[in-house]
Image (spheres, rainbow, N blue to C red):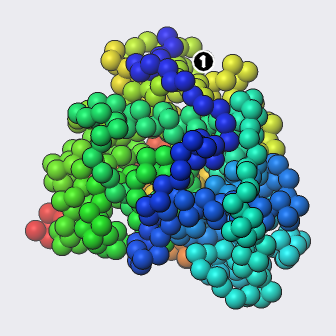
Amino acid sequence: MVYKSPFPDLDLPSCNILSYLFPKDKAPYDDPLWYDAKTPESNLSPAQALVWVKRLALGLERLGLNKGDVVMILTPNQIFVPVAYLGIVGAGCCFSGANPAYTVPELVHQINNTTAKLILVHPNHVKSALAAAEKTSFPLNRIFQFSDTWVPAKAGITDFRSFIGSEAEAASYQWPELTPEEARTTVATINYSSGTTGLPKGVCVSHANLVANVEQTIVMRYAHKPYPFEKRPSERWIGFLPLYHAYGQLYTILMATKLRVPVYIMTDFRYEEFLFNIGRYKITSLQIAPPILVMLSKRPETSRYDLRSLRDCLCGAAPLSKELQNDCQRRFGMQINQGWGMTEVTCGAIHVPGGVSDDSGSVGQLDPNCELKLLDDDGKEVALGEPGEIYVRGPQICLGYWRNEEATKESLDADGWLKTGDIAICNKEGYFWIVDRKKELIKVNALQVAPAELEGVLLENEHIADAAAVGITIKDVEAPRAYVVIHESSKGRVTPQEIQEWIKSRVAKHKYLNGGVIFIDEVPKLASGKIQRKVMREWAKRDAAEIERRMATEGRAKL
């Protein structure tokens, strides 16, 4: 059985993303669109941003960058990230965002893997960029500081305004138009994902992928709203999702531009600041991951802020229990709908249609132009209502992994079906529920953590003979957990807590072993030497149940 979207197929444009967002027959929007949430006087309208986009594109040409060259950006969220994204992609180059929390080894991996030709770095992260550049022999004259205000040179690294075109030159600049075939094959973004297995890989998303996913998401967002799309009530969004991540890029940059929805961009996520901004700016809609709902539901600070402006919320990027979803719907009087996606589908492929009130925990129905099948471990299609691994096909499916043909062949077949690693069931109305995860990766605040990467770092520790990493979910929050074998000579000389602290200087914060470190005698493996991931997940489920039971007992004791 191949499931199809219940919504009619869309006639999707295939063009440069700039031609889609800024059509020649319409003047760019003049009202502010991207606001700095701390200082809203600092803002950009689409018209202003487009001038900067053209200036940046001109500058990339002058530096000798060619179509397909990669520009890496290392910055926290700021109102000029949309400029970088649209300028790089619109010029025919590839945008690759790096997590500003990355350590130097993690930056080295991304620089080497992308073969980046230029790095734009926020002034606060110049030191890390230079350290990574030294280890990769990256030319310093191809690193520029990048922020919303001009900054003086730091360690010889000048501001990006030193190489871009002038406003006068931008007035006559026209970005390269793409034929439909070029739009389908020209890489726009390289966001990093672990796919179903292994280390992070660069996911190649084309211009046509981006356009298709925006069009699909718009249809799903407003599918059953009680008003015509053209007359929808005004909206305000808050941009705290990281802009090096597909989820943040789709909404804060692409959807916001297309729908003309103002976004208040937070440099980083601080919970009380987030709550304050919702009330201050009368935010109407949220795009979040489950840990934010956990905070809204559990943390006492929530009650101190005015959240009455919230009307609806999309929750994705990780599993969400229906109990938590329904609790927050009742408490905050907003509609909370789920969706399913991954970096390899540009962003999303399944959504609960806007206007549908759901309390079942479903991730929704297929987006327009999408097909899906559910297969068992033998590659056979499962019956209706039976669990199977999601294979999905549609115009938003990525081109493959950057310079990694083997991984591409493992995930994408010749007919365009993407193997996702997520296990789902479907009912006769075409609604899906995610019931398990076959793939190895761990989700922390919507960010991916590859167990193999953590295991590689752990094995660098002099006390560790073997290690296996897995996600553990406690009270709807997932965190990395490590089961490690200690060398015989190290027993009694090191504690689990010391291993937790040791790894912090070697990985980004979302990869910390906040799920704990457990000493074991042996990592369960197959005869081939491969870690038995299923066994590790069962261990984590067992431990999580025991931890939650203990927490409940301690809570009752306190009462």
Quarter assignment of residue 51: bottom right
Q: Is residue 465 above or below residue 314?
A: below
Residue occupying image coordinates x 82% and y 49%: 67
* Nearer to me, 12 or 474: 12
Q: Position of residue 488 (x, y in %)?
A: 67, 67
Quarter assignment of residue 173: bottom right
Q: Position of residue 452 (x, y in %)?
A: 66, 52
Relative to 458, is 428 on the left or the right?
Answer: left
Instruction: Give the residue number, with chain letter if any, for mark 1.
Output: 378
Residue occupying image coordinates x 65% and y 32%: 14
Q: Position of residue 508 (x, y in %)?
A: 59, 68
Location of the C terminus by quadrant is bottom left
Mark 1 surroundings within 10 Å by alpha-carbon count, few (fewer than 14), some (14 through 19), many (20 or more): few
Amino acid tagged 1: Asp
Q: Secondary structure at mark 1?
A: loop
Q: Is residue 395 above or below residue 87?
A: above
Residue occupying image coordinates x 58% and y 67%: 80
Q: Is residue 312 above or below residue 276?
A: above
Residue occupying image coordinates x 76% and y 77%: 162
Q: Is residue 32 above or below residue 23?
A: below
Relative to 202, is 438 on the left or the right?
Answer: left
Relative to 178, is 82 on the left or the right?
Answer: left
Q: Position of residue 24 (x, y in %)?
A: 61, 43
* Nearer to me, 357 or 552: 357
Q: Is residue 42 visible?
A: yes
